[in-house]
Amino acid sequence: QVQLVASGGGSVQAGGSLRLSCAPSRPTYRWHCMVWFRQAPGNERERVATLRSDGTTRYADSVKGRFTITKDNANNTLYLQMNSLKPEDTALYYCAAARSDFSCILLSRNDFAYWGQGTQVTVSS
């Protein structure tokens, strides 16, 4: 069973940038349907960015044009580049992956087999 290890969170001022990373415990793990979620206190966990193994991406409207999801094939690590951060981006961010790309865009959070432990992002005004 593979585990995902998320890192890169921190505290920044509004307008700043952060890059989150998510690495599998098994270097040979084959990624499918890669997603970043976030959850702010009192809110439900929401999907922020999606990357299929064919390179297709999708973003929540709230982060379009500011966040970019990528995967580095050299080190098999998933990233979320976050620019122009806003206080409302403050949340615990989780990486997740499904067992396949089938219906990737439609999957609910309960359909993801692998999760990172969460990394805190705090944006101050």
Image (cartoon, rainbow, N blue to C red):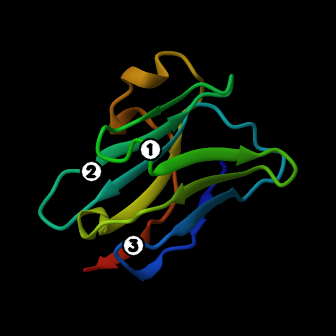
Task: Please state which of the two labelled residues, at mark 1 or mark 2, is closer to the viewer.
Answer: 1
Helix, strand or loop at label 1? It is loop
Label 1 sits on residue: 65
Q: Position of residue 60 (x, y in %)?
A: 34, 38
Mark 2 is on which residue type? Arg
Q: Quarter holding the C terminus?
A: bottom left
Q: Is residue 3 above or below residue 111?
A: below
Residue plotted at (39% across, 71% down): 15
Helix, strand or loop at label 3? It is strand
Residue plotted at (65% across, 48% down): 1
**Badge number at residue 45:** 2
Label 3 sits on residue: 121
Mark 3 is on which residue type? Val
Residue plotted at (77% across, 54% down): 26
Residue plotted at (33% across, 31% down): 108
Q: Position of residue 3 (x, y in %)?
A: 62, 56
Give whichever of 121, 65 is nearer the camera: 65
Could you tell me how far apart the alpha carbons at marks 2 and 3 are, in whole angstroms? 14 Å
- Tell me if label 3 and label 1 are in contact, CB under 8 Å: no
**Badge number at residue 92:** none
Label whose residue precedes the other's in the sequence (1 or 2): 2
Label whose residue precedes the other's in the sequence (2 or 3): 2
Could you tell me how far apart the alpha carbons at marks 1 and 2 are, in whole angstroms? 21 Å
Q: Is residue 22 above or below residue 61?
A: below
Task: Please state which of the two labelled residues, at mark 2 or mark 3, is closer to the viewer.
Answer: 3
Helix, strand or loop at label 2? It is loop
Q: Position of residue 70 (x, y in %)?
A: 65, 45
